[in-house]
Amino acid sequence: MALIHKSFATLAVLAAIAFGMLTSGMLTRMGFFRYLDRYEARRGQFYKGIVPACVEGTPWGLTEDQMPNLNGQTFVVTGANAGLGYWTAFHLAKANASSVVVACRNMQKCHKAVAALIESTGQRNMSVIPMEVDLSSFGSVLNFVAEFKRNFAEIDGLVLNAGVGFTPFSKTKDGIELQMGTNHFGHQLLAQELLPLVREAAKARRGATIVAVSGAIHMESYPEGVFPDINTMNDEGRYDPHTAYAQSKLANVLFAQELSELVSGTGVLVNSVNPGIVESDITRPLMDQLENRVGSSIRKFVETEIFHRFVTPFFWQPRDGALTQVYAALAAKVKVSGKYFDPVGRESMPDPHARNKTLQKHLWKVTENFIADWKAANLEPTKQIISS
């Protein structure tokens, strides 16, 4: 315990020095963050755009005042009640999108977010629309799709933003490890079911988009990149919360690249993005684990004002962090497909595993087969949805 306290004291001193250098501009003038932005580790440019200082002086792909007028367009954002999803919906609604569907698991939080979005963007109730979807349940996904199709005929941008991270081992309602099942399998089912509507928008306006929100952490997945089958994904003995989350984020990149190839020539643009380190609720389970190992003092320290004053300059705030995925959601801006973007809207190179075509196609097939088997077992021949 004494060693732990000594380590925290040392860390606090170093953090204070770094904070002083950062706020004084010294690290930026020394080119430290520019070096970090260009640095290529064994698995790729992990630090590119990871914090706002890394892109200082660099042309951004998009800023708030560069948003085009989105009148007549429809967007769907999953996990849009908070964080990156909320601010993605904000930017789209603010740019006059005709419909922004705020898709959430918790409808109480969803309605609260929609009310805040309407008030802050000046949009009407019919422009920002709450809808329920739980990506950890195939039944919920199909119910969402059925309801959506009753009200909309096109989707100009589908932003696959929702996710869970760093959770203890558990499984989805359909029997897949929770992080992989929610972040990848649920989103692949959703994208496949809504793809005809995205194609319609692409045909009508010469372009539509699907965005998979990944992260630099995808470079920290298992040695295999992605486990080869469902049984291995569900092996609790091999499970690690951090690495399993990284695996799901790598799966997001592989999914986007494979779907991009499958829809080539249709006008549908599919890309994956890394928003950088963003202040987000997704790290709460990680903090719970750290508290269990170190004690409640770590949470108390993290919740102090001095900690937030130190950390804030290093984190993307969700409003700015969302701009990378907003950029990728705008067909008129992004214009490319099958790419990976770092903040803010800069085309980059993902992990070597993400460049493995065999792995890419294998994961798609594993996912597609699991979904097909689930449908065969759970859906009556004449019935397209079930209650979750």
Image: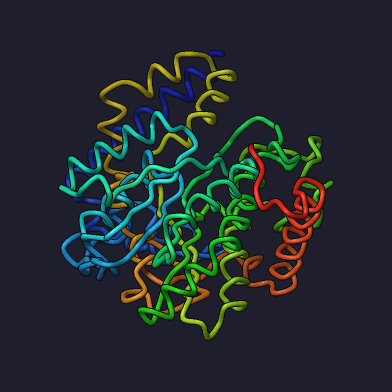
The x and y percentages for residue 191 are 56, 60
The x and y percentages for residue 65 are 16, 63
Kindly identify the residue that appears in the image at 61 percent across and 33 percent down.
167
The x and y percentages for residue 217 are 54, 51
Q: Quadrant of residue 333?
A: bottom left
**Residue 115 position (above or below residue 42):** above
The x and y percentages for residue 36 are 39, 59
**Residue 279 position (above or below residue 189):** above
Residue furthest to the front: 382
Kindly identify the residue that appears in the image at 61 percent across and 64 percent down.
255
**Residue 93 position (above or below residue 143):** below
Q: Is residue 228 visible?
A: yes
Kindly identify the residue that appears in the image at 53 percent across and 74 percent down.
338
In this orientation, which residue lies closer to the viewer: 3 or 194? 194
In this orientation, which residue lies closer to the viewer: 284 or 368? 368
Would you say 370 lies left or right of 215 here?
Answer: right
In this orientation, which residue lies closer to the viewer: 43 or 127? 127
Q: Is residue 42 visible?
A: no
Kindly identify the residue that appears in the image at 44 percent across and 57 percent down.
159
Quarter of the image with the N terminus in it: top right
Residue furthest to the right: 231
Quarter of the image with the C terminus in it: top right
